Image: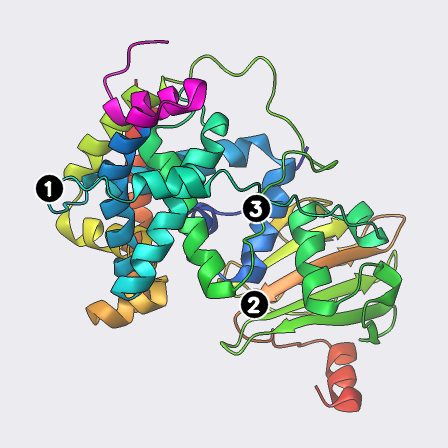
Amino acid sequence: MTSNHPTLDWLAGYASGTIEEAADAVIAAHLTLCPACRRDVARLEMIGGALLESETVSTAPDFSGAEAAMAAAMRPEAPAPRPTGTLHRLAPRPMADFIAARTGVVDVERLPWRFYGPGVERAVIETGADGTTAQLLRSQPGGTLAHHGHRSDEITYVLSGAYEDETGVYRTGDVQCGDESAPHQPVIISPDPCIALVVSEKPPAPTGLAARLAQLFLGR
Amino acid sequence: MARSEDPQSEWLSAVASRRCPDSFRRLYAHYHPRVAKFLRNRGENERISEEIAQEVMVAVWRKAETFDASKASASTWIFTIARNAHIDLIRKERRRSVDLTDPFFVPDPDPAPDDAPPAESLARRLAAAIEALPPDQAEIVRLCYLGGRRHREAADALGLPLAVVKYRARAAIERLRRAMESD
Protein backbone atom coordinates (compact mmCIF):
# COMPACT_ATOMS: atom_id res chain seq x y z
CA MET A 1 0.00 0.00 0.00
CA THR A 2 1.38 3.38 -0.94
CA SER A 3 1.40 6.23 1.57
CA ASN A 4 2.48 9.32 -0.36
CA HIS A 5 0.03 10.36 -3.03
CA PRO A 6 -0.11 12.89 -5.86
CA THR A 7 -1.74 16.19 -4.92
CA LEU A 8 -5.28 17.02 -6.00
CA ASP A 9 -3.81 19.36 -8.65
CA TRP A 10 -1.91 16.52 -10.28
CA LEU A 11 -4.88 14.14 -10.11
CA ALA A 12 -7.12 16.81 -11.66
CA GLY A 13 -4.50 17.33 -14.38
CA TYR A 14 -4.59 13.60 -15.09
CA ALA A 15 -8.41 13.54 -15.11
CA SER A 16 -8.69 16.53 -17.44
CA GLY A 17 -5.87 15.25 -19.67
CA THR A 18 -3.74 18.37 -19.29
CA ILE A 19 -0.41 17.12 -17.93
CA GLU A 20 2.77 16.07 -19.70
CA GLU A 21 3.20 12.53 -20.93
CA ALA A 22 5.93 11.79 -18.37
CA ALA A 23 3.77 13.06 -15.50
CA ASP A 24 0.87 11.04 -16.91
CA ALA A 25 3.04 7.92 -16.64
CA VAL A 26 3.84 8.78 -13.01
CA ILE A 27 0.17 9.20 -12.09
CA ALA A 28 -0.94 6.09 -14.01
CA ALA A 29 1.77 4.00 -12.31
CA HIS A 30 0.65 5.23 -8.90
CA LEU A 31 -3.03 4.63 -9.74
CA THR A 32 -2.18 1.03 -10.64
CA LEU A 33 -1.12 0.56 -7.01
CA CYS A 34 -3.53 2.89 -5.23
CA PRO A 35 -7.31 2.24 -5.08
CA ALA A 36 -7.88 5.43 -3.04
CA CYS A 37 -6.41 7.69 -5.73
CA ARG A 38 -8.32 5.75 -8.42
CA ARG A 39 -11.50 6.64 -6.58
CA ASP A 40 -10.45 10.31 -6.44
CA VAL A 41 -9.68 10.32 -10.16
CA ALA A 42 -13.07 8.71 -10.91
CA ARG A 43 -14.72 11.61 -9.08
CA LEU A 44 -12.59 14.18 -10.87
CA GLU A 45 -13.52 12.60 -14.20
CA MET A 46 -17.18 13.09 -13.31
CA ILE A 47 -16.55 16.83 -13.55
CA GLY A 48 -15.54 16.31 -17.18
CA GLY A 49 -18.63 14.16 -17.76
CA ALA A 50 -20.94 16.78 -16.29
CA LEU A 51 -19.37 19.53 -18.41
CA LEU A 52 -19.58 17.40 -21.58
CA GLU A 53 -23.23 16.74 -20.83
CA SER A 54 -23.96 20.44 -20.32
CA GLU A 55 -22.53 21.45 -23.70
CA THR A 56 -25.12 23.04 -25.94
CA VAL A 57 -25.23 21.67 -29.48
CA SER A 58 -27.50 22.15 -32.49
CA THR A 59 -30.91 20.71 -31.72
CA ALA A 60 -31.53 18.59 -34.84
CA PRO A 61 -30.48 15.03 -33.93
CA ASP A 62 -28.17 13.47 -36.48
CA PHE A 63 -28.12 9.66 -36.64
CA SER A 64 -26.32 9.50 -39.97
CA GLY A 65 -22.98 8.15 -38.76
CA ALA A 66 -24.39 5.63 -36.29
CA GLU A 67 -24.65 2.72 -38.76
CA ALA A 68 -21.10 3.32 -39.98
CA ALA A 69 -19.86 3.38 -36.37
CA MET A 70 -21.52 0.03 -35.58
CA ALA A 71 -20.09 -1.51 -38.78
CA ALA A 72 -16.58 -0.19 -38.08
CA ALA A 73 -16.63 -1.62 -34.57
CA MET A 74 -16.99 -5.14 -36.00
CA ARG A 75 -13.33 -5.11 -37.00
CA PRO A 76 -11.42 -6.62 -34.09
CA GLU A 77 -8.73 -4.57 -32.38
CA ALA A 78 -5.32 -6.19 -32.13
CA PRO A 79 -4.36 -6.78 -28.48
CA ALA A 80 -1.16 -5.10 -27.35
CA PRO A 81 1.75 -7.53 -27.02
CA ARG A 82 2.93 -8.40 -23.50
CA PRO A 83 6.38 -6.95 -22.97
CA THR A 84 9.04 -8.99 -21.25
CA GLY A 85 12.04 -7.33 -19.69
CA THR A 86 13.36 -6.42 -16.28
CA LEU A 87 11.79 -2.96 -16.63
CA HIS A 88 8.31 -4.52 -16.61
CA ARG A 89 9.18 -6.60 -13.57
CA LEU A 90 10.29 -3.45 -11.78
CA ALA A 91 7.44 -1.01 -12.35
CA PRO A 92 3.74 -0.89 -13.27
CA ARG A 93 3.05 -1.06 -16.94
CA PRO A 94 2.35 2.63 -17.71
CA MET A 95 5.74 3.56 -16.24
CA ALA A 96 7.69 0.67 -17.78
CA ASP A 97 6.06 1.28 -21.17
CA PHE A 98 6.86 4.99 -21.02
CA ILE A 99 10.55 4.40 -20.24
CA ALA A 100 10.80 1.62 -22.85
CA ALA A 101 9.16 3.81 -25.51
CA ARG A 102 11.52 6.71 -24.85
CA THR A 103 14.75 4.75 -24.56
CA GLY A 104 14.09 1.74 -26.76
CA VAL A 105 15.32 -0.41 -23.86
CA VAL A 106 13.37 -3.02 -21.86
CA ASP A 107 16.12 -4.04 -19.46
CA VAL A 108 17.01 -1.87 -16.49
CA GLU A 109 20.72 -2.50 -16.84
CA ARG A 110 20.74 -1.37 -20.45
CA LEU A 111 19.25 2.03 -19.71
CA PRO A 112 21.65 4.92 -20.52
CA TRP A 113 23.04 5.14 -16.97
CA ARG A 114 25.75 7.75 -16.44
CA PHE A 115 27.79 8.74 -13.43
CA TYR A 116 25.98 11.49 -11.53
CA GLY A 117 27.99 11.73 -8.35
CA PRO A 118 29.37 9.16 -5.89
CA GLY A 119 26.98 6.20 -5.76
CA VAL A 120 24.48 7.95 -8.00
CA GLU A 121 23.73 7.25 -11.64
CA ARG A 122 21.38 9.10 -13.89
CA ALA A 123 19.60 8.07 -17.08
CA VAL A 124 17.94 10.86 -19.02
CA ILE A 125 14.69 9.46 -20.40
CA GLU A 126 13.28 12.43 -22.17
CA THR A 127 14.02 16.05 -22.83
CA GLY A 128 10.85 17.37 -24.36
CA ALA A 129 10.78 20.29 -26.77
CA ASP A 130 8.59 22.13 -24.26
CA GLY A 131 11.32 21.96 -21.61
CA THR A 132 9.99 18.94 -19.73
CA THR A 133 12.65 16.53 -18.57
CA ALA A 134 12.23 13.03 -17.22
CA GLN A 135 15.24 11.41 -15.65
CA LEU A 136 15.85 8.25 -13.68
CA LEU A 137 18.15 8.46 -10.68
CA ARG A 138 19.63 5.30 -9.19
CA SER A 139 21.39 5.56 -5.89
CA GLN A 140 23.16 3.02 -3.71
CA PRO A 141 21.93 2.23 -0.16
CA GLY A 142 23.08 4.83 2.34
CA GLY A 143 23.82 7.32 -0.40
CA THR A 144 21.87 10.36 -1.39
CA LEU A 145 19.93 11.27 -4.48
CA ALA A 146 21.37 14.34 -6.14
CA HIS A 147 20.62 17.29 -3.89
CA HIS A 148 18.01 19.25 -5.74
CA GLY A 149 15.23 21.73 -5.14
CA HIS A 150 11.61 20.71 -5.51
CA ARG A 151 9.55 23.13 -7.48
CA SER A 152 5.79 22.90 -7.65
CA ASP A 153 5.97 21.65 -11.24
CA GLU A 154 8.15 18.69 -10.29
CA ILE A 155 6.88 15.20 -9.54
CA THR A 156 8.87 12.12 -8.48
CA TYR A 157 7.88 8.46 -8.63
CA VAL A 158 9.72 5.76 -6.67
CA LEU A 159 10.25 2.67 -8.86
CA SER A 160 12.14 0.71 -6.25
CA GLY A 161 13.76 1.11 -2.86
CA ALA A 162 13.04 4.00 -0.53
CA TYR A 163 14.41 7.39 0.43
CA GLU A 164 13.83 9.88 3.18
CA ASP A 165 14.08 13.64 3.28
CA GLU A 166 12.91 16.48 5.51
CA THR A 167 9.33 15.97 4.30
CA GLY A 168 8.96 12.24 4.88
CA VAL A 169 9.71 8.69 3.78
CA TYR A 170 9.05 7.71 0.17
CA ARG A 171 8.75 4.05 -0.75
CA THR A 172 8.12 2.06 -3.90
CA GLY A 173 4.96 3.33 -5.61
CA ASP A 174 4.95 6.61 -3.68
CA VAL A 175 4.80 9.98 -5.36
CA GLN A 176 6.49 13.14 -4.12
CA CYS A 177 5.15 16.42 -5.45
CA GLY A 178 7.28 19.53 -5.37
CA ASP A 179 6.20 22.07 -2.80
CA GLU A 180 8.32 25.19 -3.39
CA SER A 181 10.14 24.59 -0.11
CA ALA A 182 13.87 24.62 0.54
CA PRO A 183 16.05 22.16 -1.40
CA HIS A 184 15.82 18.61 -0.06
CA GLN A 185 18.58 16.14 0.60
CA PRO A 186 17.06 12.72 0.05
CA VAL A 187 18.89 9.84 1.76
CA ILE A 188 18.46 6.27 0.58
CA ILE A 189 17.11 4.12 3.42
CA SER A 190 16.40 0.85 1.58
CA PRO A 191 18.84 -2.10 1.66
CA ASP A 192 18.71 -2.12 -2.16
CA PRO A 193 19.41 0.71 -4.59
CA CYS A 194 16.67 3.28 -4.92
CA ILE A 195 15.42 4.12 -8.41
CA ALA A 196 13.21 7.16 -8.90
CA LEU A 197 11.86 8.99 -11.92
CA VAL A 198 11.95 12.76 -11.59
CA VAL A 199 9.79 14.78 -13.98
CA SER A 200 10.19 18.52 -14.11
CA GLU A 201 9.31 21.27 -16.51
CA LYS A 202 12.88 22.47 -16.49
CA PRO A 203 15.97 20.54 -15.38
CA PRO A 204 16.13 20.70 -11.58
CA ALA A 205 18.87 22.99 -10.38
CA PRO A 206 21.42 20.81 -8.57
CA THR A 207 22.86 22.44 -5.49
CA GLY A 208 25.04 19.65 -4.08
CA LEU A 209 28.77 19.57 -4.69
CA ALA A 210 28.66 16.13 -6.31
CA ALA A 211 25.94 17.15 -8.68
CA ARG A 212 27.79 20.36 -9.53
CA LEU A 213 30.96 18.42 -10.22
CA ALA A 214 29.00 15.97 -12.35
CA GLN A 215 27.62 18.88 -14.29
CA LEU A 216 31.05 20.31 -14.77
CA PHE A 217 32.58 17.04 -15.98
CA LEU A 218 29.69 15.94 -18.10
CA GLY A 219 28.85 19.34 -19.43
CA ARG A 220 25.21 19.01 -18.39
CA MET B 1 -31.95 -3.38 -14.73
CA ALA B 2 -32.41 -0.64 -12.17
CA ARG B 3 -34.56 2.23 -13.34
CA SER B 4 -32.28 5.18 -13.91
CA GLU B 5 -33.29 8.81 -14.27
CA ASP B 6 -30.40 9.43 -16.61
CA PRO B 7 -31.58 8.27 -20.06
CA GLN B 8 -28.08 8.35 -21.55
CA SER B 9 -26.78 5.82 -19.01
CA GLU B 10 -29.86 3.70 -19.61
CA TRP B 11 -29.16 3.66 -23.37
CA LEU B 12 -25.53 2.77 -22.77
CA SER B 13 -26.53 -0.05 -20.41
CA ALA B 14 -28.85 -1.39 -23.12
CA VAL B 15 -25.97 -1.36 -25.60
CA ALA B 16 -23.75 -3.05 -23.01
CA SER B 17 -26.19 -5.81 -22.07
CA ARG B 18 -27.88 -6.60 -25.40
CA ARG B 19 -26.14 -4.60 -28.15
CA CYS B 20 -29.34 -2.62 -28.71
CA PRO B 21 -28.86 -0.69 -32.01
CA ASP B 22 -31.73 1.72 -31.27
CA SER B 23 -30.14 2.76 -27.98
CA PHE B 24 -26.84 3.22 -29.76
CA ARG B 25 -28.47 5.49 -32.36
CA ARG B 26 -29.83 7.65 -29.54
CA LEU B 27 -26.44 7.74 -27.83
CA TYR B 28 -24.85 8.65 -31.12
CA ALA B 29 -27.25 11.52 -31.81
CA HIS B 30 -26.70 12.81 -28.27
CA TYR B 31 -22.94 12.45 -27.90
CA HIS B 32 -21.44 12.67 -31.37
CA PRO B 33 -22.05 16.45 -31.62
CA ARG B 34 -20.92 16.99 -28.02
CA VAL B 35 -17.69 15.08 -28.52
CA ALA B 36 -17.03 16.93 -31.81
CA LYS B 37 -17.53 20.22 -29.97
CA PHE B 38 -15.20 19.01 -27.19
CA LEU B 39 -12.49 18.41 -29.81
CA ARG B 40 -13.03 21.79 -31.45
CA ASN B 41 -12.71 23.29 -27.97
CA ARG B 42 -9.36 21.52 -27.67
CA GLY B 43 -8.16 23.31 -30.79
CA GLU B 44 -8.87 20.75 -33.53
CA ASN B 45 -10.36 21.78 -36.88
CA GLU B 46 -13.81 20.76 -38.10
CA ARG B 47 -12.65 17.75 -40.14
CA ILE B 48 -10.41 16.25 -37.45
CA SER B 49 -13.04 16.89 -34.77
CA GLU B 50 -15.67 15.01 -36.80
CA GLU B 51 -13.25 12.15 -37.49
CA ILE B 52 -12.20 11.71 -33.87
CA ALA B 53 -15.79 12.03 -32.65
CA GLN B 54 -16.67 9.18 -35.02
CA GLU B 55 -13.78 7.11 -33.63
CA VAL B 56 -15.00 7.79 -30.11
CA MET B 57 -18.50 6.55 -31.01
CA VAL B 58 -16.98 3.43 -32.60
CA ALA B 59 -15.20 2.83 -29.30
CA VAL B 60 -18.46 3.35 -27.41
CA TRP B 61 -20.13 0.57 -29.43
CA ARG B 62 -17.08 -1.66 -29.23
CA LYS B 63 -16.32 -1.28 -25.52
CA ALA B 64 -19.83 -0.87 -24.12
CA GLU B 65 -19.50 -4.10 -22.07
CA THR B 66 -16.91 -2.42 -19.89
CA PHE B 67 -19.40 0.31 -18.86
CA ASP B 68 -20.61 -0.09 -15.27
CA ALA B 69 -23.59 2.13 -14.49
CA SER B 70 -22.98 1.75 -10.76
CA LYS B 71 -19.55 3.36 -11.12
CA ALA B 72 -19.97 6.11 -13.69
CA SER B 73 -22.56 7.86 -15.78
CA ALA B 74 -22.53 7.53 -19.57
CA SER B 75 -21.31 11.12 -19.89
CA THR B 76 -18.30 10.51 -17.62
CA TRP B 77 -17.44 7.25 -19.38
CA ILE B 78 -17.62 8.91 -22.80
CA PHE B 79 -15.69 11.95 -21.54
CA THR B 80 -12.77 9.68 -20.61
CA ILE B 81 -12.83 7.99 -24.04
CA ALA B 82 -12.88 11.39 -25.80
CA ARG B 83 -10.13 12.78 -23.56
CA ASN B 84 -7.90 9.77 -24.25
CA ALA B 85 -8.65 9.85 -27.98
CA HIS B 86 -7.49 13.46 -28.11
CA ILE B 87 -4.33 12.70 -26.14
CA ASP B 88 -3.62 9.80 -28.55
CA LEU B 89 -4.00 12.23 -31.45
CA ILE B 90 -1.59 14.77 -29.98
CA ARG B 91 1.00 12.22 -28.87
CA LYS B 92 0.58 10.02 -31.96
CA GLU B 93 0.52 6.99 -29.67
CA ARG B 94 -1.75 5.35 -27.15
CA ARG B 95 -2.14 7.07 -23.79
CA ARG B 96 -0.67 4.80 -21.16
CA SER B 97 -3.36 4.34 -18.56
CA VAL B 98 -3.96 1.85 -15.78
CA ASP B 99 -3.99 -1.73 -17.10
CA LEU B 100 -6.29 -3.97 -15.07
CA THR B 101 -4.28 -7.03 -16.15
CA ASP B 102 -1.00 -5.50 -14.93
CA PRO B 103 0.61 -7.88 -12.39
CA PHE B 104 1.20 -4.78 -10.23
CA PHE B 105 -2.50 -3.84 -10.20
CA VAL B 106 -3.89 -3.54 -6.66
CA PRO B 107 -7.65 -4.22 -6.78
CA ASP B 108 -10.21 -2.15 -4.90
CA PRO B 109 -10.78 -3.28 -1.32
CA ASP B 110 -13.52 -5.89 -1.21
CA PRO B 111 -16.30 -5.33 -0.39
CA ALA B 112 -16.39 -1.83 -1.87
CA PRO B 113 -17.27 0.81 0.75
CA ASP B 114 -21.07 1.11 0.66
CA ASP B 115 -21.06 4.66 2.01
CA ALA B 116 -20.52 5.76 -1.57
CA PRO B 117 -23.70 7.34 -2.94
CA PRO B 118 -24.93 5.92 -6.28
CA ALA B 119 -23.26 7.39 -9.36
CA GLU B 120 -26.49 8.96 -10.46
CA SER B 121 -27.14 11.03 -7.34
CA LEU B 122 -23.48 12.10 -7.39
CA ALA B 123 -23.92 13.31 -10.96
CA ARG B 124 -27.00 15.32 -10.00
CA ARG B 125 -25.26 16.96 -7.05
CA LEU B 126 -22.21 17.67 -9.15
CA ALA B 127 -24.25 19.34 -11.89
CA ALA B 128 -25.86 21.59 -9.27
CA ALA B 129 -22.48 22.42 -7.75
CA ILE B 130 -21.07 23.34 -11.18
CA GLU B 131 -24.04 25.67 -11.72
CA ALA B 132 -23.31 27.28 -8.37
CA LEU B 133 -19.59 27.88 -8.98
CA PRO B 134 -18.51 31.53 -8.99
CA PRO B 135 -18.13 32.53 -12.67
CA ASP B 136 -14.36 33.12 -12.42
CA GLN B 137 -13.87 29.58 -11.07
CA ALA B 138 -16.28 28.00 -13.56
CA GLU B 139 -14.41 29.67 -16.42
CA ILE B 140 -11.13 28.03 -15.43
CA VAL B 141 -12.64 24.59 -14.83
CA ARG B 142 -14.20 24.75 -18.31
CA LEU B 143 -10.94 25.91 -19.89
CA CYS B 144 -9.06 22.98 -18.34
CA TYR B 145 -11.59 20.16 -18.64
CA LEU B 146 -13.20 21.08 -21.95
CA GLY B 147 -10.58 23.28 -23.58
CA GLY B 148 -7.69 21.07 -22.44
CA ARG B 149 -5.69 24.13 -21.39
CA ARG B 150 -2.92 23.78 -18.85
CA HIS B 151 -2.92 26.27 -16.02
CA ARG B 152 -0.23 28.32 -17.71
CA GLU B 153 -2.16 28.41 -20.99
CA ALA B 154 -5.34 29.38 -19.16
CA ALA B 155 -3.43 32.18 -17.42
CA ASP B 156 -2.20 33.47 -20.80
CA ALA B 157 -5.66 33.20 -22.35
CA LEU B 158 -7.27 35.13 -19.50
CA GLY B 159 -4.42 37.59 -18.90
CA LEU B 160 -4.14 36.47 -15.27
CA PRO B 161 -1.13 35.57 -13.12
CA LEU B 162 -0.47 31.84 -13.00
CA ALA B 163 -0.89 31.80 -9.22
CA VAL B 164 -4.42 33.21 -9.52
CA VAL B 165 -5.38 30.53 -12.05
CA LYS B 166 -3.94 27.78 -9.84
CA TYR B 167 -5.76 29.16 -6.80
CA ARG B 168 -9.12 29.38 -8.58
CA ALA B 169 -8.74 25.96 -10.17
CA ARG B 170 -8.01 24.38 -6.79
CA ALA B 171 -10.83 26.26 -5.05
CA ALA B 172 -13.26 25.07 -7.74
CA ILE B 173 -12.13 21.44 -7.68
CA GLU B 174 -12.28 21.33 -3.89
CA ARG B 175 -15.81 22.78 -3.91
CA LEU B 176 -16.97 20.23 -6.47
CA ARG B 177 -15.35 17.41 -4.58
CA ARG B 178 -17.02 18.47 -1.34
CA ALA B 179 -20.36 18.59 -3.12
CA MET B 180 -19.85 14.96 -4.18
CA GLU B 181 -18.92 13.88 -0.67
CA SER B 182 -21.64 15.56 1.40
CA ASP B 183 -24.71 13.52 2.31
Q: Residue at x 42, y 34 (%)?
A: B61
Q: Secondary structure at mark 2?
A: strand
| Quarter of image, res A136 | bottom right
Would you say A110 lies left or right of A183 here?
A: right
Q: Residue at x 56, y 55 (%)?
A: B94
Are dots 3 and 1 on a single chain? no
Residue matched to label 2: A200
Amino acid residing under circle 3: Ser
Please say whether residue A34 is visible from this viewpoint.
yes
Q: Residues within 10 Å of mark 3 (few under 14, many from 20)?
A: some
Are dots 3 and 2 on a single chain? no
Which of the pair A32/A144 is nearer the observer? A32
Q: Is residue B149 magenta?
A: no
Q: What's the chain of the residue with tag 3? A: B
Amino acid residing under circle 1: Ala
Which of the pair B178/B107 is nearer the observer? B107
Q: Quadrant of the C terminus of chain A?
A: bottom right
* Cα–Cα gap, marks 1 and 2: 47 Å
Q: Secondary structure at mark 1?
A: loop
The percent position of residue A38, horizontal first and vertical second, equals 52, 35
Q: Secondary structure at mark 3?
A: loop
* Cα–Cα gap, marks 3 and 2: 20 Å
The percent position of residue A63, horizontal first and vertical second, equals 23, 39
Q: Residues within 10 Å of mark 1 (few under 14, many from 20)?
A: few
Residue matched to label 3: B97
Q: Specify the segment rendered in magenta.
A: B1-23
Q: Residue at x 85, y 52 (%)?
A: A86
Q: Which mark is residue A60?
A: 1
The percent position of residue A175, horizontal first and vertical second, equals 62, 49
Which of the pair A104/A151 is nearer the observer? A104
